Image: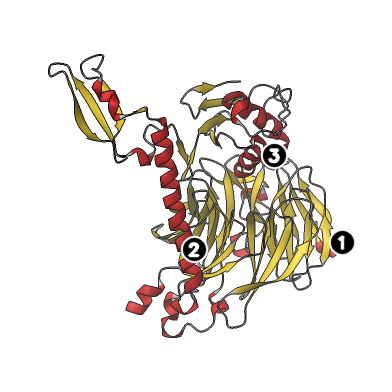
Amino acid sequence: RDRRDAMSEYKLRADCKGHEDDVRGVAVCAADVFATCSRDKTVRVWREAIGGVGFACGTVCVGHESFVTALAFAPDASSVVSGGRDKTLVAWDPATGDARGTMRGHALDVTAVCVLPDGRVVSGSMDKSIKIFDPSKSFECVETFENAHDSSVLALVALPDAHGGGFLSGSADATIRAWKNTAVPEGRDGAVFGRHADTVRGLSLNKTLGLVLSASHDTTARAWTPAGAVVAEYRGHSALVYAVASSACGARVVTGSEDDTARIWLAATGECTQVIPHPGCVWSVAYLPRAAVGDAGDDAGDDVGDVVTCCADGSVRVWSASIDRVDAEAAKSLDDFLVARRAERAARSLEDAQSKLKLEPPSALTSPGDRDGATKVVKEEGGGIAAYTWNASAASWERLGEVTGVGDGAGAGKKMHAGREYDYVFDVDFKDGAPPLKLPFNDGDNPYAAAEQFLETSGLPMEYREQVVNFIVQNVGSANVAQGANVDPFTGAGAYVPGGAPSGGFGAGGGGDGGAHDP
């Protein structure tokens, strides 16, 4: 029993390096093979290394002209299908890296892809449309659903025949909709299957329990029956949830979030059993079938399969609950890095907080206070910081005690967002009735990089980048952005309205300085 308890916590099995930018998606191809896609414009195929401990990149698929953000596996054709910012989809041979076909037709970024049981490829885009391509017809587009949602289509999942077939789509409009599904009354395409309180970012299946899983910007993931009833909610993340996946046995669920963690949950109850910290946000997650990890011996019942996570730091990581497959050296290296980073952040926070205090030398206590109860913060000999108050009746300064707690950001003017500190976190109201989006920014950052990150994180088209940049510059001041950012002050006259033509206003609520912003 003690051994099974030790196996229940996931430890690092492999730190797969090769991508040169954020890893945005993962697709399981076989028991010991998976593919990933990245902002570095590539798709990589990873295979279990000799000895069964780690994974090695065996194939690199090159051909996209921009970020690759969506990925799926077509089992019948043994193809990996990717979609990206270049508005195209490509079907790849995972063994050679050769392109088997290219699919075009979307007006904006391809942000979601799935493969139907009959082999047809379904894609979703920031242009709000869904397209179906047929590999048997030279990957011709055979059907298009224009304006499938009121905003970007960010997630897709194919449904088995037992669920009525077809597929589900998730969107920035916070809805999940059903298509080609015989379980929907009168077979109505686009019928609302379910809703979140914010953007639906990920969809997957728990095939064993017969459930649909969804991940949302409302910081939750949910499990749904085929009829659209919520039967479990996975609540605990402190920021946007980008991805959700189920173990093959159906007992566990894994989620990935902007809060720099992956979390393991009991599928049926929604109880979180483990938080796995990462060096950056976790864009995508998957479970490998247990068969991928060989014979687990007497403890096989507790081994539900290894977990794959895709991180913003460019690494793909495989986590195992089996102590026999843990890479102790890699695990210690990652733990040491995370501990050091936490200490560095705490030190920066302390330094920043102290820099914002009006520190005075001990000699300041030789002058009387200007009123009873006046205070001074003094940097004492030896480096300590203490607060003093003026006692008018005694005509003396009385030491109140050391100033503590400055390391937690008190008085520092910093704002917390997704587990990180920022100089500004703007509440951006982009749609009536929808929760505001968070736009973080630090003094000295490049506004273009911040705008792109904001749009990607929010699942919004890059065509609004200039409006976001102008908004940042107007609200933080040109002196507080990175020099050489080439900001054009004439590009911000129009609105930032997802899915619409630029017209109107780009509204914001409370920002990093506590005020309102209405450029």
> Element under label 3?
loop
The amino acid marked with disc number 3 is Pro
The x, y position of residue 407, in whole percent, is: 37, 41
Q: Which mark is residue 408?
A: none
User: Which color scheme did the rendering employ for the protein?
Assistant: secondary structure
Whether residue 78 sits left or right of residue 366 in the image: it is: right
Disc 3 to disc 2, how far (Cα)?
34 Å
The residue beneath circle 3 is: 461
Of 353 and 118, nearer the camera is 353
Q: What separation in Å lies between label 1 and label 2 (alpha carbons)?
A: 45 Å
Amino acid type indicated by mark 2: Leu
Across and down, in percent, residue 246 comes to: 52, 63
- Whether residue 470 sits left or right of residue 269 in the image: it is right
Q: Earlier in the sequence, mark 1 or mark 2?
A: 1
Task: Give the residue pinned by disc 1.
Answer: 138
Quickly name the residue at label 2: 334
Viewer-nearest of discs 1 and 3 = 3
Question: Is 473 or 210 nearer to us in this picture?
Answer: 473
In the image, 62 versus 442, the foreground residue is 442
Is residue 391 visible in the rendered image? The answer is: yes
